[in-house]
Image (cartoon, grey):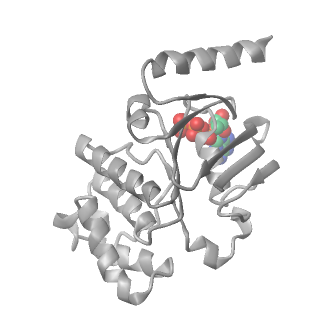
Amino acid sequence: MSALPLHQAGHRFGDRDALTGLSFAAAHGEVVAMVGLNGAGKTTALRVLTGRLRPDRGTARVLGEDPATMRPTTARRFGHVVGAALVSGDLTVVENLRSAASLHGLPRADVEHASADVVHRLDLDAWADAPARTLSAGNAQRLGIACAVAHSPSALVLDEPTSALDPRGVVLVRELVRSLADDGAAVLVSSHHLDEVARVADRVVVVHGGRVVGELAPGDEMERRFFAMVLAADAEADA
Ligand SMILES: Nc1ncnc2c1ncn2[C@@H]1O[C@H](COP(=O)(O)OP(=O)(O)OP(=O)(O)O)[C@@H](O)[C@H]1O
């Protein structure tokens, strides 16, 4: 079953079309990457999926529900980082994680273990007792992701999750995302890095001009095929 479908989603900011009939889905057990040029519509699509924007047309569903009116029981099975993460600067890394896990409804008995586990998986051990506001940009990004996954969500949406990360962080996030999908989660990430998504994604969706213009199988010549799709879409729009 598809956990994260968008169907013919449209959204306009003033006189600017951000989404122009965007459709795709991520199923349980798969990692789908959305790639596209700056301004293609990736973040707008993810904001629709997290309920922060209502599409002007079309539909979005997360775990079978409209994200804007999602029941709390469903929201607890969802994790996302799109824009600012749900992190308090005054709380320590571990306190933030306990808080995020509890807010997502993790049983009290499991909160401690889940928090410690994700701290370790994202190599934040040395910062466990540091206030979040003292973290470097890369470690703050790791913490935001950690807070989104501590409850082992069934659906996960991450906007450019490795933009501030060092090469080790990139590998750790890749392993984390992969293991969540292997455990059955539907994962959707946006990225600018074709070589990186090729390593983690089952499918790579190309967004251009607010819609999906093709799909790349991870592998050779992704860059060439990416630009061929984008140029073909531009030529079609100009015709
Ligand atoms: N709040 C806003 N107000 C007006 N226009 C917006 C707003 N947010 C996005 N846009 C416009 O919508 C279009 C899609 O933007 P979006 O941020 O979704 O692109 P993106 O693919 O995430 O880009 P990037 O790779 O640069 O992050 C762009 O033309 C952008 O200028």
**From this viewpoint, is residue 33 visible?**
yes
Quadrant of the snapshot with the N terminus: bottom right
Q: Which of the two residues, 53 or 63, is positioned nearer the viewer here?
A: 63
- Where does the image place residue 169, in percent across and percent down from the top left? 27, 48
- Where does the image place residue 159, in percent across and percent down from the top left? 50, 48
What residue appears at the point 40 percent right and 71 percent down from the top-left corner? 88
Quadrant of the snapshot with the C terminus: top right
Q: Is residue 183 above or below residue 110?
A: above
Q: Quadrant of ligand 1?
A: top right
What residue appears at the point 28 percent right and 56 percent down from the top-left corner? 139
What residue appears at the point 26 percent right and 54 percent down from the top-left corner? 136
- Where does the image place residue 85, in percent across and percent down from the top left? 46, 61
In the displayed image of the protein, which residue is found farthest to the left? 126
Q: Is residue 100 above or below residue 179?
A: below
**From this viewpoint, is residue 92 visible?**
no
What residue appears at the point 72 percent right and 39 percent down from the top-left corner? 22
Asked where in the image residue 221 lies, by quadrant, the reply is top left
Count of labels in the image:
0
Q: Is residue 112 above or below residue 62?
A: below
- Where does the image place residue 189, in percent across and percent down from the top left? 50, 46
* Side (left or right) of 237 relative to 142: right
Asked where in the image residue 18 lies, by quadrant, the reply is top right
In the displayed image of the protein, which residue is found farthest to the right? 57
